[in-house]
Structure formats: structure tokens, C-alpha cells
Amino acid sequence: MELGRRIQIKGSSGSGKSTFAKRLSEITGIPYYEGDTIYWRANWTAPTNEEFADRLDKALSGEEWIFDGNYGSQSEFFSQRVETVIILNYSFWLIMKRLLRRSIRDVSSKKMMYGHSQQTFRAAFTGKMGLIPYTIRTFRRRLRQYDELDANPGHIQVIRFRHPCEADKFLTDLQNSVPK
């Protein structure tokens, strides 16, 4: 399977988008751009849509990139530029288990996220935009979006994994196909 040179990794929070994207970048040599690092400003301040569009335009101006994140506000940007979308479409319970484990670890270690925002109990567990409530609220909507993309991909190559073992096998097979 031939991958495009502009790749977007999609999936719910906790699906492993960043980990997958980093491994894919290491295997292919295509530069990786972390969506949340481009998006978030200090103290979990969200940019305006225009500001985020400008940041994306600057970061993803090259011919090759791997980007992780959904960012529906920028769907037109991605639909015009992306060649391959890889969807990590895992079960709700697997994602919640991963998110809870990661959030507890990050909160207890006071981890700095994306270089400028400290992970807090509030940011992870409470409020409309808390990571856990946000994921619960958006999980089904994301599945519908992925189904729609699968049904109407246009020029975009769509690869969808329903279990981490499938994604791991894909990366292993890809790595084994790269000349040493």
C-alpha cells in the first residue's frame, strides 16, 4: 500500500494518535506535527479559528507532513491538502481506560503539556472542555464523521484501524518494507 505524503491521523482523545504519528514519522522520514502543540496556547487558551488556520498554514506548508488531530473547524483545510487519513477507531472502553490512566499520571506528575500548559485535575476531569467529559461527549459524533469519510473519501485514501493490534501490524509491516 502506497501512503500519501500528507497524512492526517484521526481518532478520539486517548486513541494513541500522537504515538502512532511519531512511529509513522520515524519509519517514513516524513516530518511529524503534533496538532495539540500547534493548537493550544498557554494555560489551555484556545486560539481563534483564524489564528489556528494561520498556524496550520505555516506548520503544514511543506510537501510532506504527518499531523495528528481531528479539528473539525479546519476540515476544509485538511480536505484540500491531505492525501491519506488514518483513523484509530477503537472502542469507547479502551479509549476511556487509556485516558483515565494517562490523565491520572499526568495530573499527579504535574506534567507540562505542549510546552506551556500544566495538566491539572480540572483540565482533565471537569467542565465542558475537560478531556474526559469532552471525549465522552464527542465519541459518537466522531464515529459518525469517520463513517462519512469512509463512505465518501473523494481523493483521500482512508485507512481505518478498529484495534491497536491492527495499527501495530500496519506499522510493523511498513517498517519491514522499508529498505535497510
Image (cartoon, rainbow, N blue to C red):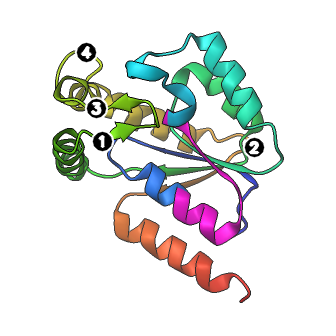
Amino acid type shown at disc 3:
Thr
Q: Residue at x 71, y 65 (%)?
A: 29
How much space separates mark 3 and mark 4, taking CA atoms? Answer: 10 Å
Position of residue 15 in the picture relative to residue 132 (left or right): right
Q: Secondary structure at mark 2?
A: loop
Q: Secondary structure at mark 4?
A: loop
Position of residue 133 in the picture relative to residue 31 (left or right): left
- Between 22 and 177, the residue placed more toward the observer is 22
Q: Which label sits on residue 111? A: 1
Q: Residue at x 21, y 45 (%)?
A: 109
The numbered mark, 2 or 4, whose residue comes first in the sequence reads 4
The numbered mark, 2 or 3, whose residue comes first in the sequence reads 3
Q: Are marks 1 and 4 in contact (CB under 8 Å)?
A: no
The numbered mark, 1 or 4, whose residue comes first in the sequence reads 1
The numbered mark, 1 or 2, whose residue comes first in the sequence reads 1
Q: Secondary structure at mark 1?
A: loop
How much space separates mark 1 and mark 2, taking CA atoms? Answer: 39 Å
Q: Position of residue 143 (x, y in %)?
A: 38, 37
Neighbour tally class for label 1: few under 14, some 14-19, many 20 plus, Cα within 10 Å: some
Q: Are marks 1 and 3 in contact (CB under 8 Å)?
A: no
